Image (cartoon, rainbow, N blue to C red):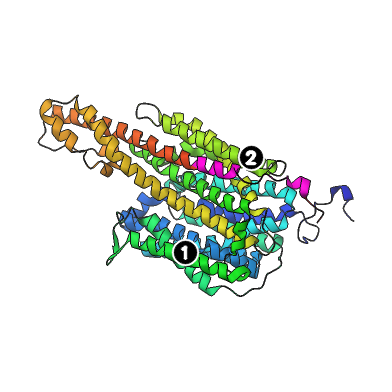
Amino acid sequence: MSRPASRAPVAALVDLHGRSAWSILPALLAGFFMIMIDTTIVNIAVPTLVKTFDASLVKVGWVSSAYLLTFAVLLLVSGRLGDRFGPRPVFATGLVVFTGASLACGLSPSIEWLIAARTVQGVGGALMTPQTMAMITRVFPPHQRGAALGLWGSVAGVATITGPLLGGLLVETVGWEWIFFVNLPVGVVALWLTYRRLPRLERHTRRIDGCGVVLSVLGLFLLVFGLQEGEAYRWGVVVGGVTVWHMMGVGLVLLGVFGWYQVRRGDDALLPMRLFKDRNFFLANISGAAVGFAMTGLFFPLTLFLQAIAGLSPIQAALVALPGSLVTGVVAPFAGRLSDRVPAKWVVGFGFAVFAVAVAWMALWVSADDSPWRLLAPNALLGVGTGAVFSPLANLATSGLDQRTAGAGAGVFNTNRQVGGVIGSAAMIAMLTSRLSQTVPAAARDAAASLPAPYQEQFVASFADAGSTLGTPLANIQVPPDVPPQASEAIKAAATTAISHGFATAAGQTLALAAAVAAVGMISALVMRGGRTHRDTETPA
């Protein structure tokens, strides 16, 4: 029996054999949720992994770094692979790789095995991510695209912030292995949905730009590695006489050569440079890098403050951020629908403005003398800004793409957002360390006034290298054993005051950088072309 005309699905851009375009979302969002949650879920397990594998903190840090590095470097290539071979097979391949690597991670007998498995997991995530945006762009009619990307954006926001909370619960109850095993049922279901629900889209057969692949992968690897791991090497020598700065410099040169080569290749390039002739696509990528910078960067000083200074447990610290996650999940779908009805640039501009205000509010409220739980309020407001930015911005970035370049455009957008996050993390660490070298000694001079005169000068001098207080819990403050007990207690109290007040001041000043970058994203959004809404301009499919 045929379906009544009044209930017929809205026409999609491809033949779905009578199904609604919405039927493709469960598979895409399930895979995307796994990718995004795995960017943060491991962080909470770092102390457990150090004990389990008897490994150094630097080596365990590579469990996260290997995933993020591989993920960021391959996004551009995988986006173009989706155009060449079709989004469905590339997404399915990435899903199999990611799920299999998750099993390997949970079964890891050594830290080296775990790092290798996380590297492979990053490959799977990179293969999937651009296909989620590209398939939404190619399947949904323009007037529904914002609503669909709204759900996509809500998944990104919720998964990223939920990771530490879910990770903490799994580590403390069933073991660290389950932060990876939890992906297995999700991956299996997503794979079944992929073959049942995702359509085979038209492939655009061109030769793979091998030279472009090599240049982009090497250039991005060197640049992202330098930014991501620079602090671990103290921005000095990595191996032999090669420094972090050498690596980033060569990376930038290779990316410059890559850009020149892509212009010469025209439409056959890995990255068709004509995409950037579209003003909104160009500016959306700037805004995407800004939101990646601000989102990733702000949680570093905030998490350190909550745990090292305010004394919260990892789960408690995650709970402070939970309102932002919940509000993002609620706001993003509404923002996506709104971007179908009004020019999306106004929604994005509003979101960035709210984001900047929320981070500035946090910067003002980070205090050693007040309860850290009062940060719940600005975190909730942050969720409003995040939800209003993610999906409408993706809508703006993809609205000018055609069927031949949807994958490449999605790859560029996600690469810029991810690299923006890496830059944000490095910049915030550098700024926090720099500010600590000023704020902690200043707070120490004030705190020294409460100490007996013989100890004041030595007390202030002990804070000369204030960068070493980065992440040091207050409970770990040590006093030389030859100091009398009464003076020792006074010194500990003064040190606690100096570190807590100095760190809070430095954290607030560092958060201001994230607010400023969010303001840049807002300006970039507001100078986009307004245009008419999709509903006004759509032609029948």
In magenta, the rendered stretch is: 518-537
Q: Is residue 474 left or right of residue 288?
A: left
Q: Earlier in the sequence, mark 2 or mark 1?
A: 1
Q: Which mark is residue 255?
A: 1
Q: Which mark is residue 346?
A: 2
Q: Which mark is residue 384?
A: none
Residue 344 seen in the current view? yes
Q: Position of residue 2 (x, y in %)?
A: 89, 55
Q: Position of residue 532 (x, y in %)?
A: 73, 45
Q: How far, Cα to Cα, is label 2 from label 1? A: 33 Å
Between residues 223 and 337, which one lies in front from this camera angle?
223
- Residue at the spot x=69%, y=40% of the render? 338
**Element type where label 2 sits in the image:** helix
**Element type where label 1 sits in the image:** helix
**Quadrant of the image for the C terminus?**
bottom right
Between residues 478 and 340, which one lies in front from this camera angle?
340
Give the residue type that dot 2 points to. Trp
Label 1, residues with CA under 10 Å away: few <14, some 14-19, many ≥20 = many
Q: Is residue 116 left or right of residue 5?
A: left
**Quadrant of the image for the N terminus?**
bottom right
